[in-house]
Amino acid sequence: MARGGSLAALRAGIRASVDEMSTAAGREAQRAQRSRWATLPHEQLVPDASQPRKHFDAERLNALAESIRAVGLREPLRVYPVAGGRYRILDGQRRWHALGLLLQEGLEQFREVLVLLDDAPQGDARLKVEQLVTSVHKEVFVPLETASALREIAAHAGEDGQPLAAARLAERFGFNAKFVERHLRVARGLSDAERD
């Protein structure tokens, strides 16, 4: 099958699954009512081995850990109970790995993790669709968008009205310094191209 055809088939399959999920609005509303917030120890959370996202880029994971160190966890992990008093991660496996990196450094303030307790998914296929749709919705910024956003932050984030240097920007917001420097170089290139 041609690549375009397989992509169209994938889109159609996802669309059908999403449609099925949205027609179940009543069930989703009931599920939302049963969901609740909690904090759980990092070690009680277990990754889902069948999660569609299999590869975690080490540089991005370290950057996420640095961001969490600087500003805290901004979005809870979604989990559901499994045997042995543990909770399987439905959404948030990258954040869980990043928190693990911080714990390896001895930063105990990250041991208790904010979670949204959910019901166990009904059916493996539905779980897969939900995880895939969530991953697609969390598409990362493309480098040009990241560069542009960092350029704007650097220009306006200085306390004395002056632009922030890359190292200070990285430190202040928990970004990896090399990541910031690389993207600010791209942003300078964009500025030069815009002037031409």
Image (tube, grey):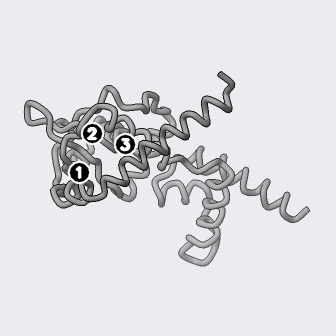
Q: Are marks 2 and 1 in contact (CB under 8 Å)?
A: no
- Residue tagged 2: 89
Residue located farthest toward the left when viewing the structure as drawn: 84
Residue 30, x across and y down, in percent: 19, 58
Q: Residue furthest right?
A: 196
Whether residue 79 sits left or right of residue 140 in the image: it is left
Which residue is disc 1 drawn over?
115
192, above or below 123, in the image = below
Q: Quadrant of residue 2?
A: top right
Q: Which badge, 3 or 1, is on the more N-terminal residue? A: 1
Instruction: Indicate the secondary structure of the residue bearing disc 3.
Output: helix
Identify the residue shown where x is 48% and y is 49%. 137
Say which element carries label 2. Answer: strand
Location of the N terminus (image quadrant): top right
Question: Neighbour class for label 1 at 10 Å: few (<14), some, many (≥20)?
Answer: many
Task: Write down the residue under mark 3.
Answer: 130
State the residue at coordinates (25%, 48%). Answer: 110
The numbered mark, 2 or 3, whose residue comes first in the sequence reads 2
- Callout 3 crowding tier (Cα within 10 Å): few <14, some 14–19, many ≥20: some
Residue placed at 32% from the left, 37% from the top?
127
Q: Amino acid at mark 1?
A: Val
